[in-house]
Amino acid sequence: MKKEPSSAPKLIKGLEGVVAAQTSLSDVDGENGRLLYRGIPIGELVEKSHFEEVTYHLWYAKLPNAEELRIFKETLKAQRTLSERALEVLRFIPTTTHPMSALRTMCSLMGSLDPRAHIVNPEESLRKAYHLTGVFPTIIAAFYRLREDKEPIQPDMSLSHAANFLYMMSGKKPTQEMEKALDAYLILLADHGLNASTFAARVTTGTLSNLYSAVTSAVGTLAGELHGAANQYAMEMILEIGAPANAIPYVNKLLDEKKKVMGFGHRIYKTRDPRAEAFRQIAHDLCVKAGKTEWMEIAAQVEKVMMDRKKIPCNVDFFSAPVLYVLGFPPDFFTTVFAASRVAGWSGHIIEQQLDNRLVRPLAEYIGPAEQYYIPHEDRK
């Protein structure tokens, strides 16, 4: 057998451990279970900040002063309204469509309706980032209400980004606890290094395609079961378990059958997911307030079995699932809320890629047949 030259590129499936980009947005410290946005620990941001300020921090590489924050919030609010043309298209999407497919379609449509979509530079991308970040909750809430045979609700410009999202879903202004819970979720999921959807966005950006195309790529990638859809399946598992007494035998059966328990494990974090730790108390408090303590009891039992048998900690999907459910989001809408958060990070990465761009073009190892010859169809067996 011919020996492969030592200089031949080595195949690394899934690009695991490969450094493919540089970023100053977030530091995912898997060994120590830490996540920092431009140097600030995620727990500190959840405790002291809010989504709008965190998004400014990601996009502008600093915390805003009072006037900068005021202008940022007003600019973001101005992008909330969905145009009549866009709403008309949304009404044509079958209500049987998965919400992530509807969001992906509408994200692409936003580019079609923007006469400057084709202009590619960091300044234009920032303008488009405001647009998508502002309008994503409106699209999601409108599609939810249309599916429920209800009319979409216009944004309330007096409310925060998180509170307005909840208001457009239900038509009721949320409590402070509900607003804080969703705001914390939006902060915790806003960015996370070079994850699959962010990588997809940067690959698309690397071709000099525009931000709408890149975010559409990212939304499609996020929809996958091994990425953003895990929170939906985590909640469906909790609902299927039904009662705390059923949790231990349910999880043991899954493990005995070598099946995956959703909401556990992470490619990067080896000790703990800091986002899950930051969200744990928020989840507990909200479920207690809503009278849904059985879900947290189920979660505690599932977590215990996983630690006892597999020594695998939960990830952010596990505790975010019951919170989103209590807040009024159906499980199949969970990943759209993830996208409404992560669009802030995607946008930051797209601009970063544009500032120091190189086309992403890896190699593929050919494993097909050696050189063959064409056989005329009449001579084929």
Image (cartoon, grey):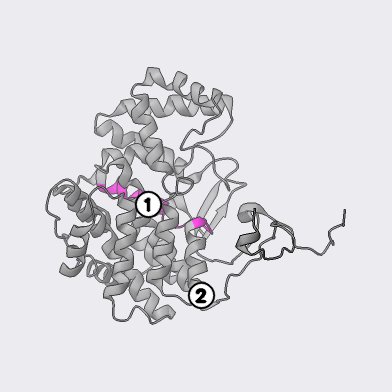
Give the magenta range: 179-196
**Helix or strand or loop: what does disc 2 sit on?**
loop
Instruction: Give how far across and how far down residue 135 sits, in percent.
Output: 26, 64
Q: Is residue 358 left or right of residue 261?
A: right
Residue highlighted by disc 1 = 338
Q: Residues within 10 Å of mark 1 (few under 14, many from 20)?
A: many
Q: Amino acid at mark 2?
A: Thr
**Helix or strand or loop: what does disc 1 sit on?**
helix
Between 100 and 269, the one lying in front of the other is 100
Q: Amino acid at mark 1?
A: Phe
Residue 288 lies, with reference to residue 225, above or below; the image says above
Does any portion of residue 63 appear in the rendered image?
no
Q: Quadrant of residue 243?
A: top left
Residue drawn where x is 44% and y is 51% of the image: 44
Residue 244 lies, with reference to residue 138, above or below; the image says above
Residue highlighted by disc 2 = 207
Q: Residues within 10 Å of mark 2 (few under 14, many from 20)?
A: some
